[in-house]
Image: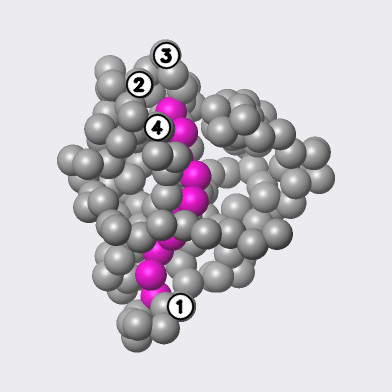
Amino acid sequence: MSLIVRDLTPEDRPEWERLWTGYLEFYKTTLPPEVYASTFARLLGNDPRDFNGLIAELDGKPVGLTHYLFHRHAWKIEDVCYLQDLWADPNVRGQGIGRALIETVYERAADAGSTNVYWLTAEDNAQARQLYDRIGALTPFIKYQGP
């Protein structure tokens, strides 16, 4: 078994779309094609404040993705890193895909001088939380959202 995590490329569009669709379906969300196009373009863009994308490949087949971005924080001088989306194909779960993606984001954040990586998940996402509890720290914050 050969697992690699690499930057997203333009050629990854079909597999990225398949993986991101699985992620969105897990969260019972659908998005129109123009959001897919916009998100993919942002992931490949040159704006340092925009998203970055990684693909995990197992034996040469894309099986996972993550999207992350750096942003300013009022409590810190350096940027922080928000890991927005993380997904591994359900049929390869438990093989280190999620861990490898998160650890690569940790490395990218450290390389960028960011001292903090954070992410959100659904409270009932028990399988993912088993991993998150091992490689991150649960915070006491509760998310609120406006209209």
Percent x, y of residue 138: 26, 51
Q: Nearer the viewer, residue 115 or 2?
A: 115
Position of residue 58 in the picture relative to residue 48 (left or right): left
Residue 55 against residue 69 in the figure, above or below: above
Secondary structure at badge 1 equals loop
Percent x, y of residue 22: 57, 26
Q: Which residues are magenta?
A: 79-88
Label 1 – label 4 distance at C-alpha: 28 Å
Mark 3 = which residue?
91
In front: mark 4 or mark 3? 4
Mark 1 = which residue?
72
Q: Are marks 3 and 2 in contact (CB under 8 Å)?
A: yes
Residue 110 against residue 107 in the figure, above or below: below
Residue at (32% x, 70% y) in the render: 114
Label 4 – label 2 distance at C-alpha: 14 Å
Q: Residues within 10 Å of mark 1 (few under 14, many from 20)?
A: few
Q: Are marks 4 and 2 in contact (CB under 8 Å)?
A: no
Mark 4 = which residue?
125
Quadrant of the snapshot with the N terminus: top left
Q: Residues within 10 Å of mark 4 (few under 14, many from 20)?
A: few
Q: Are marks 1 and 3 in contact (CB under 8 Å)?
A: no
Residue 82 appears in the rendering: yes
N-terminal label among 4 and 2: 2
Mark 2 = which residue?
93
Give amino acid for label 2: Arg
Give amino acid for label 4: Asn
Label 2 – label 1 distance at C-alpha: 33 Å
Residue at (25% x, 32% y) in the render: 130
